[in-house]
Amino acid sequence: MNEHIRPALATLGLMVVLTGLAYPLAITGLGQALMPQQANASLIERNGRIVGSALVGQAFAAPRYLHPRPSAVDYDAAAAGASNLGPTSAELLALQVARAEAFRAETGAARVPVDAVTASASGLDPHVSPQNALAQAARIAAARGAPEAAIRSMIASHVEPPLLGLFGEPRVNVLSVNLALDAAFPLAATLPETEG
Amino acid sequence: MSTSLLVLTLYAAATVGLAWLLAGYMHRVFTGQRVWLSPIIGPLERGFRGAAGPAASRAQGWAAYSMAVLVFNLCGFLFLYAVLRLQGALPWNPEGIRAMAPDLAFNTAISFVTNTNWQAYSGEVQLSYLAQMVGLTVQNFVSAATGMAVAVAVIRGFVAKGDGRVGNFWTDMVRAVLYVLLPISILTAMLLIWQGVPQSLGAYIRASTLEGASQVIAQGPAASQIAIKQLGTNGGGFFGVNSAHPLENPTILSNMVQSMLILLIPVAFCFLFGRMVGDRRQGWAIFAAMGVLFVTGLLLIHGFEQAGNPMLTVLTGITGPNMEGKELRFGATLSALWAQATTAASNGSINAMHDSFMPLSGLVMLLNMQVGEVIFGGVGAGFYGMLLYVVLAVFLAGLMVGRTPEYLGKKIEGREVTLAVLAFLSMPLGILVLSALSAVVPAGLAAVQDAGPHGLSEILYAYSSATGNNGSAFAGFGAGAPFHTTLQGIAMLLGRYAIIIPMLAIAGSLATKRPAPATAGTFPTHGPLFVTLLVITVLILGALTFFPALVLGPIAEHVSMLGGQSF
């Protein structure tokens, strides 16, 4: 056993310095120098204020905004999480039924998309499906006093296709749509004062 | 559906192609030949040898090699435990995170030293940046390198000409990190940053949303850790929800790269084996057996997840894939692929919540772990685990024809078979005995979230994952209380060292035997007959051991679901 102590300590020492300090710090330096936007969580600012990350979902409840998927942690980005309930859980099924009814009542949609009643894995899913987003167009249009067709075409222009047309699912980033909605269809109350 | 199958095929082709290339490189590394990185890394390696002394380069027998593994892992455990207990007083802790509780630190330290990376904690809540880097990232590298070193030593035992030597642990371990794990991790980490994974020592971000609410966004030096967590089949996420977190796995591209890294080294080991034994067909045969089991499981999980939850359809009329606990960008296809890859390899990272998968998808994942993580398996660990089944398979074949079994010219005798059975028994011991204990003791049952058969599945999954050194979870299971942190710690130790030591002993025993030339009576171990025999051995020995428990868990849940019974 004693013959192994010296190499063990030498190996551990080398690994702590190399893989525990030099490696992550070098990557931090390179990342910060070459890709500061991504290395700092892809933040979005509006009027000099951080409104969120382009990658992290947020809660939206007001009728004028596109709403995200249900979240088991209410979009708490400091403690992400899921329901972790199994497919035969009565609690889960009751939640999903209630969400389906709420979605129908709110949008008048006949077909409820499955992503509108299921909570994501992270609780921070930044996306909804195009069907889910389009079903909300009428509500958003009414709240903003804007033509529904204009809202639909804005949502359609935000649909991200699968990678190379194959990998992953078509999706709509909720925060980026909502920023675009605020820019293109501002509410009367938030209009910049132009007269006088 | 056809798009999904094309996606899965392209993924498999790319992974196997890269693994084949990597195997050639690893062969040069582990046989001490020069590679293109030698001019850069060589001086560092020589400096290390000077510091480590002569014991770090002389050839060892199996016993010395095992002792070196144990001493090194013990030192790593003590160091990591100390870091976790002291993190509150150490720097790089902008969120003021306090020391981990003793039982949780014990569990976490064992978890990372054994390459399990079971997470009874949540990274963004309970770990400082220093603990993530100096504590966990280091063990991500060295636990992976330990598995690779042991696998290479076991292979050497099968090819040795009778001198009983299996190599030097310190040389193998350091070369695995310097030449293989670190260079690939650097490239991957930069690619992940480009895709949006943060890499910063700054504090969490305080955003104020368009609706005026505030949102705290956890971040940190994530990319560097995520690269090695995937490459080393470690699986411990920077964030609690692992690669489902949009900052840990932001895009489809980051997802495909991480999915490929899960299987890269485990697949490469098949081809490395073929090169080291001087007969590449032997490597292809083991690859084929693993591949058959992998593809079968993948198609099953994919089918169940795409079909969705029939109970939801009955209640709401909603059809579509099972999206509870899945991220929209990945959908059912890429979530099913990840689930199969991460449970077949003992990676344990996730991009969707396994607890919410359909019951029979859960069954496939459980089986992947229960057969001992040998369907490609952990880096190195999966390969020496499969060699255990190879020993048993040729023994069974020998019994059937009444000849002394041989593999690669080495006679497989009583000692090897006894050791292989001993190693095999650690899986049922860790999974069935400890699950049964948890299912009857109140402190064990307190962790179960779901009612009905799914609750039993949660217990089984926890102990299959720990004993298989996988690390993924049915995360509704509340593993944070002292009963389970302690028992899981024991299961992880059992699943690691009660297989490593017997496998090295088998290698040591074979290394003292001179290989005999093949004769007309030798059972060929590179053809379809042997592949079939190996697959059947895995299924009979591995699967039948756990079948009764699986009937009470996922199968009972599936039948209930079809009958419209919720819990």
Image (tube, rainbow, N blue to C red):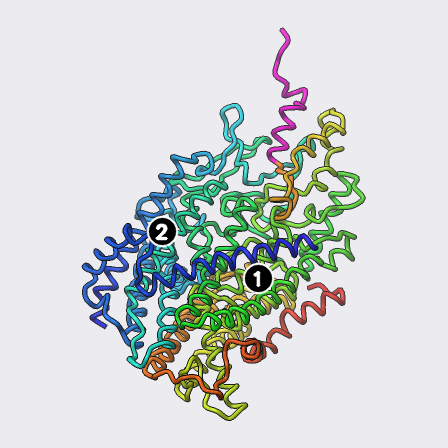
Q: Please tell me if label 2 and label 1 are on a single chain.
A: yes
Front one among B27 and B337:
B27
Q: Secondary structure at mark 2?
A: helix
Find residue B2 and report its horizontal and vertical position in percent. Answer: 69, 55
Q: Identify the residue at horizontal 31%, vertical 81% (top origin).
A: B162
Callout 2 crowding tier (Cα within 10 Å): few <14, some 14–19, many ≥20? many
Give the magenta range: A175-196
Q: Residue at x 38, y 78 (%)?
A: B502
| Residue wearing tag 1 | B340
Task: Tell me, for residue A30, which label it has, or none.
Answer: none
B527 and B45: which one is in front? B527
Disc 2/disc 1 C-alpha distance (Å):
30 Å
Q: Is residue B475 left or right of residue A4?
A: right
Whether residue A141 is situated above or below residue A167 in the rendered picture: above
B225 to B515, vertically: above or below = above
Residue A29 visible in the displayed image: yes
Q: Nearer the viewer, mark 2 or mark 1?
A: 1
| Up/down of B551 relative to B268, above or below | below
State the quadrant of the C terminus of chain B. bottom right
Alpha-carbon neighbours of circle 1 within 10 Å: few (<14), some, or many (≥20)? many
Residue B388 drawn at (x, y percent): 45, 77
| Residue B398 % position (x, y) | 50, 88
Q: Which residue is mark 2?
A: B131
Question: Are circles 2 and 1 on residues that touch, CB within 8 Å?
Answer: no
Residue A6 lies, in percent from the top left, at 21, 64
* Residue type for callout 1: Gln
Question: For the residue labelled by badge 1, is the local secondary structure a helix, a strand or a loop?
Answer: helix
Q: Is residue B179 left or right of residue B223?
A: left
Q: Amino acid at mark 2?
A: Ala
Between A39 and B266, the residue placed more toward the observer is B266
Q: Is residue A19 above or below residue B161?
A: above
